[in-house]
Amino acid sequence: MNRRLQISSFVPSCLRALVPPFPCLLLLIAAGAGDGSTSPDAQRKPTDRSSEATSVPSEDAVRAAREMLDRAEFAVTQAERDELAKSIKEYIESIRSAEPQDAWLLYLQGRLNVVSGRFSEARDQLRAFLETREGRNEWSAYRVLGDLFVEQFPRLAKFQYDRAVELKPNEPTTLLGLSICEQKLADLDNARQHAQEAVLADGRRNVRYLVQFATVLKAQKRWAQAESEAAEALELAEAAAAEQPGDSEVLQRVEAQYRLLTEIADGLLRESPGEAVAYTRLAGYVRKHADVQRRLRGHDALAVLALGVERTAPNVPIELRAAYAIELAEVGRRQEATAQFELVLAADPNHALAREWLTRLSAKPTAPSP
């Protein structure tokens, strides 16, 4: 691939550093069990390409698209995935216009379809890519195919994961998929081993791997170790939520961690009802879980109020706008709340509640209690 691509028309509009989720069962784990950090590659912030040369080698364009696909796989929110998908599409179209027969287009389009939820098309494209000279030894194509098969066809997925491990040993994403696959096949010992290897290969930085390890330990009734791993995952998830306090999808992952810890503590007590200290821990998890759920309901209320503001615009009633602003502030979206309160005051300079909230919002924010 030595042809040079004109990229002035497809420079990504915005490339953020992103963190979950991937398809099928792995997507559920990322969204439902939580993911508070990313791999080092996923953490690197993309650069603004607008000031670069007007052309790059096609292999560089493929490499850039692959890096964005990796970030999209680890993305926390749908908005982040959609933003990356838009940029990836632009790269794909530019590569296609210059090299329409490039085999890597099958790979890129297949993985983009995974991000977009078109799993059937993704399977066909990745299988076709593996039949090409470029694809036959590409470990990540086998791993993604394993992710696509693992929920319904774990034995078929295992073949894909085994091949990926053979091509690139000690890769945490593959080890994670292999662990999930073996758990579904009731091979809990190997599932635990591969989950632990994924955690170690990642350096204990990614909630996704810690959650799978804790889940397998829970299935084996290794309660103390399961609780320890799940508690570490919770710390990472809460740290990520503290950095994005107004994001409901990040908060949902914290909620999932408390759910896992509650299940582990409850399992321990069912087996050993005399473990007095476990009752205290379980009560704490239940209380904090309820608090996170309450905060999530705040996001639900916010969605209702946002709809009301949209439907009554441009003549939004003052009290509706004030209620909307308060809910924005409550969920942590302080700048938006400030803007709405200022609109309230513009309509009614004597609105005491708006003035009170603006005073609060001008103070330094405090992180929510863990």
Image (spheres, rainbow, N blue to C red):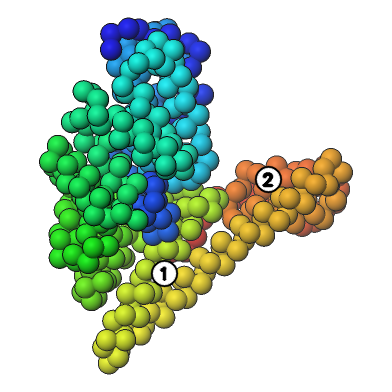
Q: Amino acid at mark 1?
A: Arg
- Is residue 208 visible in this depiction of the protein? no
User: Which residue is denoted by mark 1 in the rendering?
Assistant: 259
How far across and how far down the image is residue 323, in percent?
A: 75, 56
Quarter where residue 122 is shown = top left
From this view, report whether residue 366 is shown above or below residue 278. above
* C-alpha gap between disc 2 and disc 1: 34 Å
Q: How many marks?
A: 2
Image quarter (top left, top right, bottom left or bottom right) of the N terminus: top left
| Residue at the disc numbered 2 | 338
| Quarter of the image that includes the C terminus | bottom left
In the image, what residue occupies the spot 76% across and 45% down?
A: 310
**Residue situated in front as seen by the camera: 164 or 154:** 154
The one of 201 and 45 positioned closer to us in this rendering = 201
Which of the two discs, 2 and 1, sits closer to the camera? 1
Residue type at the position of mark 2:
Thr
Q: Residue at x 36, y 36 (%)?
A: 124
